[in-house]
């Protein structure tokens, strides 16, 4: 069920087929599951190299639910800053960390 629900989110967000949309492996805690959706949503040109814009979003499915809901998102051009979200279980909570190691979202 989880893989199918994640695949649906990925396919629903694959708007521009020039850019790739992908998902992280899900992380689970006491029946709640979360994953990170990574989307390239734009690309600007002006320098020597293209400057892609990415959106990273956290999706959560609570116990008893059948679909994921977006609970956090961030986006930036690569030239502006590095953007990265990672999920893990920490102290009994699902936690998302950004590229600086700061907690940006948690579910307990």
Image: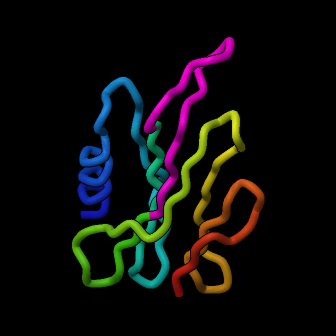
Q: Position of residue 78 (x, y in %)?
A: 65, 36
Residue located 58% across and 82% down the image = 93
**In the rendered image, which quarter is residue 77 located in?**
top right
Name above or below for residue 53 compared with residue 97.
Answer: above
Q: Which residues are magenta?
A: 41-58
Name above or below for residue 45 compared with residue 62.
Answer: above
User: Magenta region, mostly helix, strand or loop?
Assistant: strand
Q: Where's the N terminus, which quadrant?
A: bottom left
Q: Position of residue 69 (x, y in %)?
A: 33, 69
Name above or below for residue 78 compared with residue 62.
Answer: above
Q: Position of residue 12 (x, y in %)?
A: 25, 48
Q: Nearer the viewer, residue 85 or 53?
A: 53
**In the rendered image, which quarter is residue 103 located in?**
bottom right
Q: Does the segment drawn in magenta span residue 54?
A: yes
Q: Does the segment drawn in magenta span residue 53?
A: yes
**In the rendered image, which quarter is residue 14 located in?**
top left
Residue located 65% across and 48% down the image = 83
Name above or below for residue 4 compared with residue 49.
Answer: below
Q: Nearer the viewer, residue 94 or 106?
A: 106
Q: In the displayed orientation, state which residue is furthest to the top.
A: 48
Residue located 76% across and 62% down the image = 101
Q: In the displayed orientation, state which residue is furthest to the front.
A: 46
Q: Along the horizontal axis of the image, is 102 left or right of 3?
A: right
Residue located 41% across and 72% down the image = 33
Q: Along the horizontal axis of the image, is 12 left or right of 23?
A: left
Q: Nearer the viewer, residue 80 or 35?
A: 80
């Amino acid at each position: 069920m989880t893989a199918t629900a994640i695949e649906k989110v990925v396919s629903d967000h694959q708007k521009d087929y020039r850019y790739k949309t992908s998902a992280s492996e899900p992380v689970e805690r006491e029946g709640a599951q979360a994953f990170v959706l990574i989307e390239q949503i734009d690309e600007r040109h002006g320098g020597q190299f293209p400057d892609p814009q990415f959106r990273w979003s956290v999706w959560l499915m609570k116990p008893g639910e059948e679909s994921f809901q977006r609970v956090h998102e961030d986006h930036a051009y690569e030239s502006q800053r590095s953007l990265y979200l990672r999920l893990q279980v920490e102290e009994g909570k699902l936690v998302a960390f950004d590229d600086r190691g700061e907690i940006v979202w948690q579910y307990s």
